[in-house]
Amino acid sequence: MGAEAKRVKREVLGIPDRHKHRERASEPPTGRTKDPGTHQRTYRYRFYPNPTQAQQLAQTFGACRWVYNEGLALRANAWREHRVSVGFAETCRALTGWRNARETSWLQDISSTVLQQSLRHLDSGFTRFFKQAGSHPKPKRKGKSRDSATYVRTGFRWREDPGRPGTGLISLAKQTEPLDVRWSRPLPPGQTPVKLTVTRDRTGRFFLQILVEEQITRLPAAVIPGTTMPRAVGLDLGLAALVTMDDGSTVDHPRLLKKYARKLAQLQKELHRKEKGSANRGKVREKLARLYTTVTDVREDALNQLTTRLVHENQVLVVEDLAVANLTRAASGTGRRRKAKLNQSIKDAAWGTLLRMLQYKCEWYGRTLVIVDRFFPSTRRCSSCHTKGERLDVSVRFWTCGMCGVAHDRDVNAAVNLRQEGLRLYAHVLAALPPERRPPAVIRASELPDPVVAA
Ligand SMILES: [Zn+2]
């Protein structure tokens, strides 16, 4: 490797050699020390570009897509044909080459940092793939993939409005006028945004996602009154209910609301009647896409309220590892297939969103999310006497323990088991911590040493 890989990269793949920045290397690192109460948080706003801005953004989206695909091809080919691995830094050097080449000189009209971010996204895609947490990155296709462009600090200007703190003027690189942003709520005042992501959805609406570093105050510890025991909840994620808690209460899945379902069915029928490629078909598609975004917004809202409540009420929250949780698909195919399929995808998305929200809210507010291992028999174990029973079919909702005779609701029993196991792991991690150290925001059983998990 080494010299040979370098030659392949230079001669075959056309990646220029790295320039040495000797003077830069001697500078001290510029990373700021992070305040422990500081968290990154994203705010989303709609904005209305003027025609020039819209055109420039369309060009930017196209260029980002092109660079992403080109970077992907470079990395994939380098590996397939030469067994040479090409990383982020090398794709950036290749980008410089593309910008300088005559046939792709149009890339110079786009801010180079924005294009680099596109390569950064590609790199994260590969990282997830190598960690087996995602599939191999795929080329982005116009009209199929979401239009998006990311601007880091040097790619935009921000001037806060002293009259309305938390709002202000945002100008993007290569644009002259600031964006017309609808400030539906202010950003935390006095904060300079860290990163911006501009997106355009399928209906042509533009959104601005603003990442800021925000000081979030931890909540006071939630303990059982009169004790120092943490308040804890076991959450069983399932098909019948989105969440079943160990006290027996449940939260329903954010199903497709009736009024949307009717509208959706109507639009889909309309779509099939329209001629392919016609302008009217396009209009119906647009309406459909808009309806889907509404459904998504309603769902996110409901999950936000639920997770905020859970995190406020409890110190320790226990869930099962989602990747392997008992999420056996409900059988569908009884005529209303499309609706069933959509409801299924809403459920799928709800579990993921729920866990993601719990995770970052635990971090923000000083709580702990315990993710119990996949080998923990949460469903089969009797929560009263801890006997491990037979494997239960998905259809079994109630069962009685053969050992102690206690009757169980399948999901509540699982939630109680999760709570017990989560508290056990939490206590174990806590005992191993030096005094005055806070427990971590996330405890993953799969990352703890084996005897702890098996105990
Ligand atoms: Zn039992």
Image (spheres, rainbow, N blue to C red):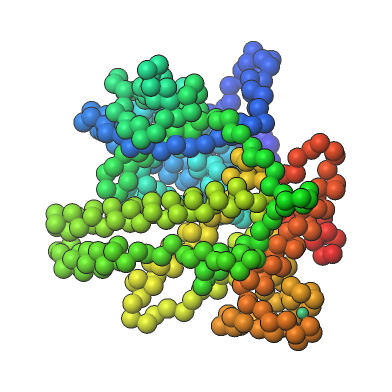
Left or right position of 255 against 412: left
Q: Nearer the viewer, residue 117 or 331?
A: 331
**Most distant residue in the top direction:** 23
Residue 80 visible in the snapshot? no
**Which quarter of the image is occupied by the N terminus?**
top right
User: Which residue occupies 43% across, 51% down?
Assistant: 301
Residue at figure coordinates x 62%, y 82% from the top left: 398
Quarter of the C terminus within the rendering = bottom right
Q: Residue at x 70, y 64 (%)?
A: 418
Where is 332 relative to 106, above or below?
below
Q: Residue at x 67, y 72 (%)?
A: 413
Q: How many numbered callouts?
A: 0
Where residue 283 sits: x, y (%)? 18, 54
**Vertical order, 28 against 233 (above or below):** above
Along the line of sight, which residue is nearer the eye, 340 or 245?
A: 245
Quadrant of ligand 1: it is: bottom right
Instruction: Please provide percent x and percent y for residue 121.
Output: 50, 41
Examine the rendered structure and indicate whether residue 151 appears above or below residue 292.
above
Question: Going by the picture, which residue comes out furthest to the front?
Answer: 226
Left or right: residue 182 versus residue 414 is left
- The image quarter in which residue 181 lies: top left
Query: Could you tell me residue 107's position as x and y percent?
Result: 36, 30
**Image coords of residue 145 (percent x, y):** 37, 49
| 58 sits to left or right of 29 | left
Image quadrant assignment for residue 255: bottom left
Q: Is residue 259 visible?
A: yes
